Image: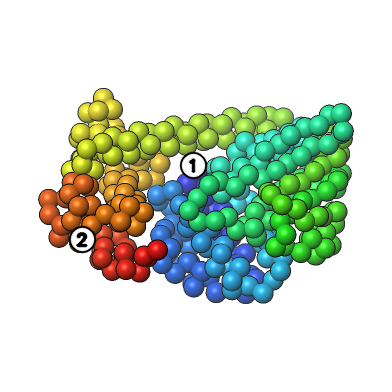
Amino acid sequence: MNHLRITSLWMNSLMQAFKQQGLDTRSLVAGLEGFSENQLQEGPPLKLATARTLWHRAQRQSNDPLLGISIGSSQNFRSTGVLMPICWHSPNARKALEHISSFQSLISENGQFQIVVSEDQGLIECEYIPRASVTPVNHHQVLSVISATLLLLREISGGQVATKKFYIPHDIDAEKVADALNCQTENCDGNFKLVFIAGSLDKAIAGRDEHLYHINLAYAEGMIRAKREGQTLIHRIKRIIDTGSPATVNIDHVAKTLDIHPRVLQRNLMEQGISFRQIKEALLKERAIDLLISQSIEVEVVSEYLGYSEPSAFQRAFKKWLGVTPRKFCEENAP
């Protein structure tokens, strides 16, 4: 199993949870890249904007004021892959929380837990920091992650984990969250933050297996390392393509610049669930949209800048990416 497999398991478990809530999953994924038959297929890494769009659609379709908690409490914990056995066999809930923070990106790139320990106050603050993106964070998506984390910690600790306060944004009903999660909740400015009573996280987890813990921990560390190495490789490839005329850059040129054989480069990218063509097309699309919309540059100039042999070739490529011509796209997205 690799991080791409874990992501697809998690997202397909999410789709099942949406379905159980009575949502129309077909309309939720309509037009979203990577989905087929209401399921996320294994392939290129799921884009953050795609995942957030899915949640925004779900919120608009649902009439549940606690959609995030409903999803977080019903999603299958096994869909987290290797993270689940690590948590169940951790020395205590505090260590499990640290592992969730460390390995969360194996499941989702939506955000990251930041843990601050205040030993003098006997508290552990766990704040969820969303990743920056052109698509804004959905608060129910974050609520699902935090509620699932809290419920898991309570489960593995035999109900010993205690919270002091749960801080949530103003657009979510604090009183209803407090009743649903049985913890004191308060609306605030800023990010979601869960404050634990530190001592309640330190009780040893009953029935844990030290051997299984270290086996799964080593496995997860290998996966997160491979994912980071893959992301570094993809970023390096993008930088090479982005110098000069991106449309003219081929894999042989990139491989030569990286001083590796093209076949080795292809194999390394396959392990990340992506191809050179997909990386190049994504970069060209990103640059084209920025030049056309943000900088208001004419289509013919954008075509030349990106390295296309003629404007018609750029227009065909653009229509293949977004379903409309560059001029039509500019009209529909004019400031």
| Left or right for 132, reference 239 | right
Q: Can residue 85 be seen in this view?
A: no
- Front residue of 192/145: it is 192
Residue receiving disc 1? 2
Between label 2 and label 1, give the one nearer the viewer: 2
Residue receiving disc 2? 315
Query: How many numbered circles are shown?
Result: 2
Q: What element carries label 2?
A: helix
| Left or right for 154, reference 110 | right
Locate the C terminus and report the quarter of the image it occupies: bottom left
| Amino acid type assigned to the residue bearing label 2 in the image | Gln
Percent from the top left, x then y, of residue 196? Answer: 82, 42
Q: Can residue 71 be seen in this view?
A: yes
Q: Is mark 1 on a helix, strand or loop?
A: loop
- For this orientation, the residue located farthest to the top is 259
Numbered badge on residue 98: none
Percent from the top left, x then y, of residue 233? Answer: 37, 34
How packed mark 2 is, by other alpha carbons closer than 10 Å (few <14, some 14-19, many 20 or more), is: some
Percent from the top left, x then y, of residue 301? Answer: 20, 52
Per the model, the C-alpha gap separating discs 2 and 1 is 37 Å
Which residue is drawn at the image coordinates 83% and 36% (left, top)? 123
| Left or right for 51, reference 113 | left
Which residue is drawn at the image coordinates 60% and 47% (left, top)? 130
| Amino acid type assigned to the residue bearing label 1 in the image | Asn
How packed mark 1 is, by other alpha carbons closer than 10 Å (few <14, some 14-19, many 20 or more), is: some
Percent from the top left, x then y, of residue 226? Answer: 47, 33
